[in-house]
Image: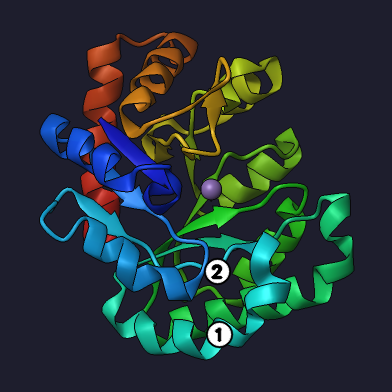
């Protein structure tokens, strides 16, 4: 199973979740929300080769953590993956738009200078702004848009710019999410959970729940589950090798 966007450090008992994931051989991109969390979160999985920790600064925290940009830049040479980063255009973050853009641009500049990274990107209500920023920094690496919820037109633009997508069970609950997932190029789609924020039936998702998304995607694409998962394994290998 593959979970390309999970916040392992934010579960009530991270060690227990990590132990379950290790037992089941789940591949995880463990994203962080602040540069300060990166070392501790990496240490949680130091004996788990299938789990990689991404260096992030979440857009919802950008205004509070802008002072951690130098730390982000100094850790970046050691971090093979970047995320969670991006922009959030929801009304409650309007007041912090400038800080968000500044932080995202600085991160993309640093990431391009470091040679590019696979990046897990948040783009809620800010798809155009995220894509504009990515086109200003074409050498920043491979963007993976997590939990994409834009329009069909924005999806087309993201696809034409080479974006990948990570899709989870919660996103596939609604018709809108399912329609978007149906229009994504299957070769550039991987599963995620966004746990513990991603929920299903009132419970925080865990990485093994990415199976639900594999089943849903296979059904939407009209494939059988083994074929859908087989292709994701190949895409995942390709993505990590390029990162
Ligand atoms: Mn997240």
**SS of the residue at dot 1?**
helix
Residue 161 visible in the picture: no
For disc 2, the marked residue is: 57
Left or right of 176, for residue 4: left
The colour scheme of the drawn protein is rainbow
**SS of the residue at dot 2?**
loop
The crowd level at tag 2 (other Cα within 10 Å; few <14, some 14-19, many 20+) is many
Residue at figure coordinates x 38%, y 31% from the top left: 206
Q: Is mark 2 within 8 Å of ligand 1?
A: no
Left or right of 66, for residue 35: left
Image x and y of residue 143, in percent: 49, 58
Dividing the picture into quadrants, the one containing residue 62 is bottom right
Q: Nearer the viewer, residue 138 or 213?
A: 213
Q: Could you tell me how far apart the alpha carbons at marks 1 and 2 are, in whole angstroms?
A: 8 Å
The crowd level at tag 1 (other Cα within 10 Å; few <14, some 14-19, many 20+) is some
For disc 1, the marked residue is: 69
Left or right of 222, for residue 44: left
Residue 73 visible in the picture: yes
Image x and y of residue 211, in percent: 33, 21
Q: Nearer the viewer, residue 179 or 61?
A: 61
Residue at figure coordinates x 48%, y 38% from the top left: 196
Left or right of 235, for residue 116: right
Picture layout, residue 167 above or below residue 217:
below
Label 1 with label 2: CB-CB less than 8 Å: yes
Dividing the picture into quadrants, the one containing residue 240 is bottom left
Dividing the picture into quadrants, the one containing residue 219 is top left
């Amino acid at each position: 199973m593959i979970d390309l966007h999970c916040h392992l450090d934010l579960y009530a008992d991270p060690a227990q979740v990590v132990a379950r994931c290790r037992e089941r051989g789940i591949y995880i991109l463990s994203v962080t929300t602040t540069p300060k969390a990166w070392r501790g979160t990496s240490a949680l999985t130091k004996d788990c080769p299938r789990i990689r920790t991404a260096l992030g600064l979440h857009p919802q925290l950008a205004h509070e953590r802008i002072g951690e940009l130098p730390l982000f830049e100094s850790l970046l040479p050691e971090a093979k993956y970047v995320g969670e980063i991006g922009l959030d255009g929801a009304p409650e973050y309007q007041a912090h738009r400038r800080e968000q853009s500044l932080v995202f641009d600085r991160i993309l500049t640093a990431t391009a200078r470091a040679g590019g990274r696979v990046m897990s990107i948040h783009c809620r209500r800010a798809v155009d702004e995220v894509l504009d920023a990515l086109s200003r920094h074409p050498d920043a690496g491979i963007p993976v848009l997590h939990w994409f919820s834009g329009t069909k037109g924005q999806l087309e633009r993201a696809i034409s710019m080479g974006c990948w997508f990570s899709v989870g069970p919660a996103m596939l609950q609604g018709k809108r999410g399912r329609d978007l997932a149906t229009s994504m190029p299957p070769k550039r789609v991987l599963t995620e959970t966004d746990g513990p924020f991603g929920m299903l039936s009132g419970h925080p998702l865990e990485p093994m729940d990415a199976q639900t998304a594999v089943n849903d995607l296979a059904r939407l694409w009209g494939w059988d589950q083994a074929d859908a998962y087989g292709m994701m394994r190949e895409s995942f290998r390709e993505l990590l090798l390029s990162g």
